Image (spheres, coloured by chain):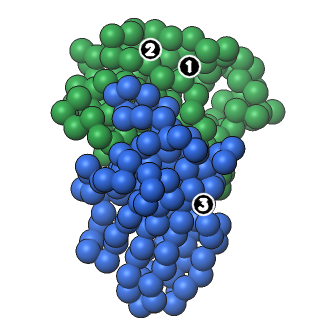
Amino acid sequence: SQQGEEDPQALSIQEGENATMNCSYKTSINNLQWYRQNSGRGLVHLILIRSNEREKHSGRLRVTLDTSKKSSSLLITASRAADTASYFCATDAKSSASKIIFGSGTRLSIRP
Amino acid sequence: GAGVSQSPSNKVTEKGKDVELRCDPISGHTALYWYRQSLGQGLEFLIYFQGNSAPDKSGLPSDRFSAERTGGSVSTLTIQRTQQEDSAVYLCASSLGPPANTGELFFGEGSRLTVL
């Protein structure tokens, strides 16, 4: 079964608004990452947050991690049409630090 | 090379035939992953290599699937006696080291497999 589950499955917002996506996972982790996938393309790494970190920023991206709730959120501020893509969280479990498991993804659409 | 390279980019085959998918990771990356993605779905983990060994093969869906990696570089994913449910995009990714140390994955563009 998937380690991570994203919520919502799909999100449509107006350009300029903020987009928030959530990820929940099942077991203790070393790291949590967020990736972006444009339609039909490979995934691109956005940001990595370690289990001892609570918040991280990169440009218009803000990621939070709550290990007590086993959840993370990705916030994209001031969204642009070019942010339209699918976003996935990925985790590597402490119990089996030999693979990185992806969630089911959130499809984000930005309306111009 | 500059990035992860996968071939072929597209493969159409008939049910029952064998297929080989190739992944050439970024030079110096010791970790290599194979994932499968069906249309509109998330990524399904298949196998992970560290060097030439595969510590985790738990994601391979059946014994028709196998993978090898030689010289700590190129990897081949082989699907024998393909079935229609094998149709998907097969994604390869590489990383500088094991997940706990260097988590970021670099992905290829994928190989789209269609089984008729």
Q: Position of residue B47 (x, y in %)?
A: 34, 55
Name the residue tied to disc 3.
B6
Q: Nearer the viewer, mark 2 or mark 3?
A: 3
Task: Give the chain letter for blue.
Answer: B
Work out whether B21 lies above or below B13: above
Outermost front residue? B71
Q: Which mark is residue A16?
A: none
Q: Are marks 2 and 3 in contact (CB under 8 Å)?
A: no
Chain of the residue where label 3 is placed in the rendered structure: B
Disc 1: which residue: A75
**The image quarter in which residue A19 lies:** top right
Q: Is residue A81 left or right of residue A61?
A: right
Name which residue type carries label 1: Leu
Q: Are marks 3 and 1 on the same chain?
A: no
- Image quadrant in which you'd find residue B101: top left
Q: Which residue is mark 2?
A: A64
